[in-house]
Amino acid sequence: MLKMTGRGFIRTGIAATIILFLNIGLSAKEEQSFFFVVLADPQIGFFEKNLSVEKDSELFKKAVNSINKLRPAFVVICGDMINDARPGKIRELQLETFYSILKEIDKKIPVYLAPGNHELTLSPKPEQLDWYRKTFGKDYYKFCVNNWQFIVINTSLIPPKFVEAETIAQKEWLKKTLESSPENLKNKTIVFQHLPFFLKDSSEADDYYNIPLCYRKEYLDILKSNGVRCVIAGHYHRCSEGKDGELQMVTCGPAGKPAYKARSGIMVVYISEDKDIFHRFFPYEDIPQNITLKAFTELKND
């Protein structure tokens, strides 16, 4: 099995909507643009309520095949890799299925995971955090690509019910990381997580699909005061977006089972040489053969 670290896969024997980046263009200026893929909620086992992994696997394989064809700079999975993290045979089957498909991504394409509530619940206990870190790797970390900074955070830590020290540690790490960012990364940061801070409005009422207001404002203030441009999340199994000042909140549709009348697919995020950010969710049936700026020019987000 493969284990995920903050920088990619490491082999460990038997052992979280996609984002895609690609160098494109013919001129030196064009080569500064890139794109990446975001996957959210492949959630192996969800379709048949843990009785089967067949349908989930079929969709996840479509995502992996698309990634290999598009050749992104990297991929981020915004949580809910599996459906049931309770110890037992069901969890082991879902993990084995997830990793057996994930490892088919070309090894030249880095993959980064963010923890979801189906790995950790919404209020994890210390033993659940330990299991996640042993199974998937770090639950919050940063990486840089093409002079852009990308940060993964663990939204299951934001309500500090059972792990207050871990909650404080992540928040302090986030503040320190952003405040100490080099000048060339200012206003060039994107955050990935599982739960959205909000779906459409930063002052919307508390809901299963957002982070409670009593924590939300503090985190949004940290991000905005440090020039974070965009937050990308999953969890909703549909697409949504909103803004809080200049900060964009994008919720990616599902790689796995959709909610209501949504469709399954991947999200492509394109960053231009002018530091503009574009995104588009492509249902599997509509994924293009290659990614060009033309697919986004009418969908500019910044």
Image (cartoon, rainbow, N blue to C red):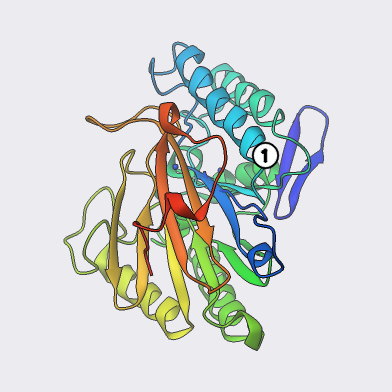
Please, what secondary structure does the residue beneath circle 1 have? helix
Name the image quarter holding the N terminus.
top right
**Front-most of residues 68 and 166:** 68
Which amino acid type is shown beneath numbered disc 1?
Answer: Thr
| Tally of numbered discs | 1
Q: Which residue is painted at 47% across and 75% down in the image?
A: 228
Q: Is residue 179 left or right of residue 260?
A: right
Visible in this render: residue 67? yes
Q: Where on the picture, by quarter, is residue 221?
A: bottom left
Residue situated furthest bottom in the rendering: 183
Q: Is residue 34 left or right of residue 28?
A: left
Q: Which residue is painted at 62% across and 70% down in the image?
A: 148
Q: Position of residue 4 (x, y in %)?
A: 70, 44
Q: Residues within 10 Å of mark 1 (few under 14, many from 20)?
A: some
Q: Which residue is painted at 47% across and 81% down in the image?
A: 227
* Image height of 260 relative to 228, above or below: above
Name the image quarter holding the C terminus.
bottom left
Visible in this render: residue 162? no
Q: Is residue 16 left or right of residue 253?
A: right
Q: Which residue is painted at 42% across and 26% down in the image?
A: 285
Q: Position of residue 279 (x, y in %)?
A: 43, 54
**Front-most of residues 64 and 169:** 64
Q: Position of residue 42 (x, y in %)?
A: 48, 32
* Image height of 13 relative to 47, above or below: below
Read off the residue under disc 1.
135
Residue situated furthest front in the rendering: 26
* Image height of 104 relative to 288, above or below: above
* Image height of 100 relative to 19, above or below: above
Q: Position of residue 171 (x, y in %)?
A: 51, 72
